[in-house]
Amino acid sequence: MDPARKRTVRLIVALSAAVLLAGALVYTSFTASSETRTPSQLASAAKPGQVYELTGKVEPGYRRDGTVTHFRVRDRAGNVSVPVSYEGTIPDPFRAGREVIVDVRKEGAVFVGEKDSLVTKCPSKFTAEQKS
Amino acid sequence: MLVAGKACLILALAVCLYGIGASLYGARTGRREWVASGRRAVYALAGTTVVAFVILEAAFLRSDFGFQLVLGHSSTTTPAFYRATAIWSSQEGSLLLWLLLLSLWSSLILFATRRRLREVAPYAAAVLLGFGAFFTALLVFLESPFDQTPGVVPAEGVGLNPLLRHPSMMIHPPMLYSGYTLFAVPFAFAVGALIARRLDAEWIRSTRPFTLTAWFFLGVGIVLGARWSYSELGWGGYWAWDPVENASLMPWLTGTAFLHSVMIQEKRGMLKVWNVSLVLATGVLAILGTFLVRSGILESIHAFGASTLGIPFLVLIAAMVGGSIALVASRAAALRSDHRLDSLLSREAVFLLNNLVLVGLCVVIFWGTFFPLISEAITGREASVGPPWFDRFIVPLALMLVLLSGIGPLIAWRRATVANARRNFALPLGVAALACVGLAVAGAASEPPALIMFTLAAFVLAGMGQELWRGTRARRVMSGEPVPLAVVALIRRNRRRYGGYLVHSGIAVLFVGIAASSSFADERDVRLSPGQSVTVGGYDLTYVRPTAELRPASNGRLERIDFGADLRVARDGRSLGTLVTEKSYFPSSGPMLGPVSRYFEGEATSEVGLRAGWQRDLWTAVSPDIGELRPIVEEGDKVFSDSAASLPAEQRGALLAEALRGLTARYADDPPPATFRVLVSPMVTWIWIGALIVFAGALIALWPSPRALARRAAAGYAARVGRETRVRVPA
Amino acid sequence: MVDLLVVLAVLALVVLLVTGPLRRGERGDEDDAERAQLEAARDAKYREIRDAELDHRTGKLSEADWRAQDRALRAEAVELLRRLDALSS
């Protein structure tokens, strides 16, 4: 094979690999992702058994029941809240008023959290104003 | 000094704008003195920024609460080290730090190249000053660090967030920012080279130390972040594919690719378009990383708050991307390769493949990080992908990367013959095969990706060892030195090569640690009462007794309450001592909270119980059950507010102390069951060791050889003699 | 008052620094830049020669391949030295 032909072959192979990777990325991300939902979105339309990524603020008045914590998550700017049951250790920054991200699945009237998916956002270092 | 600080920043902005104009004018008209003036504008930027930074630091160190920034991020009880570093725990302070580092590195590179790169340097200076102008404008108009505290100045500040009160967390930002700002240097010189159409390897050679240093600092910042996450946070992991983690990793990956592909351009004049695109992409990703951390466009463990900086950064990034594409497209003719790839069995081909893998990794991480925005744009619904999705792609790519890092050093440039290949690969392949069989027999076959990684790491390490041995032998043939001296001399004379080999070895070790700890870890979340035990990963842990303590701050006031546990550790019946873990509760300063309960509504941090070892780490964190204590806490609030209202201040304080001591005594005597997370991860220590080896290798590669330094000094004298004896030719 | 003094001092230093070349009418030497560039290229070429030799001695480059590369690199180095010498004459 002369050099020019060799180069063309190599280019085609490389491009095909890139296209394959890109295709795999796109396909798997759209099928394997979980939708981000706010509490109001979840409260109105949540399919049972489907995993959603819930984001919102923790309401005061959560309680521990053995290794399970029951808390409510509220819209960042609103009043709708949903109940969540989460099994396992709770991150250190978790408390009322903090923003959390947790993967949940609807089971009956409650949303059950997936293991190890609860993330509590570190209190903002970069707020516009720091009030004491 | 607020006015002085503000004035310095305004002056800095003016200097930047002047410098851009002077450099561009000097470059266009060829008038040296304007170029020199523009270069000095960069020095002036560094100077004024240093003054502003010192003013702010001094305010923090003396706790001057007239500075609103100091009030919001520090307090008189904050230890001196954290008072000094609190400056960059704030948005404004971190921007000032970014500007400071940028101006310092820019001054350094322009000073080092003041007699070279005549056509390129002025444009590079203009680009660097452009960045300077951007950040200075942010500091002057949007996020000023020199705002006055309105009204009456309080006597005490808010203090530093307890989560940040850890040395790693305070060194982490300067490391990362050094990495980001250092990457601006090759970016600026690439832009300059493109504008001036001087696309030979000169600009690459001159900026290589900066690229390597950027890579070094960014890498240190990333590893420090991972270590902090592992040993300070209560979840026991070191990497979560969180957007802010990914934001720092992406430029590091493209930077690694660039460091390799420039070698191809230097040797064979190939891949010019690729190189220039890589370094431009790295610069864009560095700015993108800086932007992501403070923008709020992605959900992350880093809460961003309402930030006004999103739009300006997006404009800057768009300008960088657009400008880069336009420049590369318009200079395409000058970027044509001098040679072509001769053979797939060559170091060029391996480097090219390595580049593709690194860029592939970056693309995967980019896609996954920005997927919420992408999916929203395409489907209208925001969706996100988690660590399992990342792992699916990262693992095979990482395996390929390690494989290539082992092959590259064993192959020659241009073309390797089959006979050569046989000679060079025999030993490493043999060692790898042995390792594979041995480890499979020992039980690693249950996790094939991990086994493959171990095998590849053995291949890499054997190859590096072989290279070192053969090089030493070759040297001894000529010099007759004893082996240790020969090794040292060999490395000293070939720093770049052996520094690079050391980096590859470190990466192999690092990946062994990652593979082992993620594939063979054992984790349990369990609820224990004192006296109960749990077995995890071969260790028997017994909850011996609870601990409860009030901890004072440096000024005698109460800083926090610690509730924890003493655990006894045993393995195979043999006692291994005790492990202590606790949770610290810091009071919140919210006005509506009761005096006792405020301690449980503020920040909490974990003191992880960590027993690190060569083979495995035993990690545990406790979550005391505060819920059970709540009735007592509320009662304490009530009792306190009822009786304390009528008491004078010091007696009130004494009563509160009594109440809190009673609370801790109650916890120690009759503790509710606590939740423990116990994690046994094999070979985590090797991740940190591997990282140290990588950084040692980078330092070796960076270190200027004494001969080069002496030659540079001599050249300086020779040039001066030439200059001073030559007759001046009228301009 | 202190603020004002600090600001004026910094301003004065900046102006002095930045206008220095303009006041002096600096004209750098083209030759200096050319020399520094050639010297850097020469050092890089020397490193390439040493690298090729080490590659040969550690078995990555065959005798024939190495001799060919070495010859080419040395010729390029000689060319650089010639250009350097031409500068200083």
Image (spheres, grey):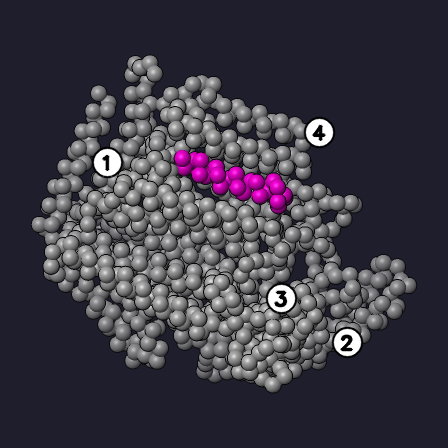
Which residue is labeled 4 in the image? C1
Q: Are marks 2 and 1 on the same chain?
A: no
Residue B661, label in figure: none
Instruction: Name the amino acid type tagged 3.
Output: Glu
Q: Which chain is disc 2 placed on?
A: B
B392 vs B592, nearest the viewer: B392
Which secondary structure class fits the magenta region best? helix
Q: Give the range drawn in magenta.
A: B123-145
Instruction: Name the amino acid type tagged 2.
Output: Ile
Q: Residues within 10 Å of mark 3 (few under 14, many from 20)?
A: many
The answer to which quarter of the image holds residue A10 is bottom left
Q: Is mark 3 on a helix, strand or loop?
A: strand
Q: What element carries label 4?
A: loop
Residue A99, label in figure: 3
The answer to which quarter of the image holds residue C31 is top left
Marks 2 and 4 sit apart, C-alpha to C-alpha, by 56 Å
Q: Residue at x 20, y 24 (%)?
A: C86
Residue A22 image point, x, y percent: 35, 65
Residue B632, label in figure: 2
- Direction from residue B38 to residue B649 in the image, left or right: right
Residue positioned most to the left: C64
Q: How crowded is mark 4: few (under 14 residues within 10 Å), some or many (20 or more)?
A: few
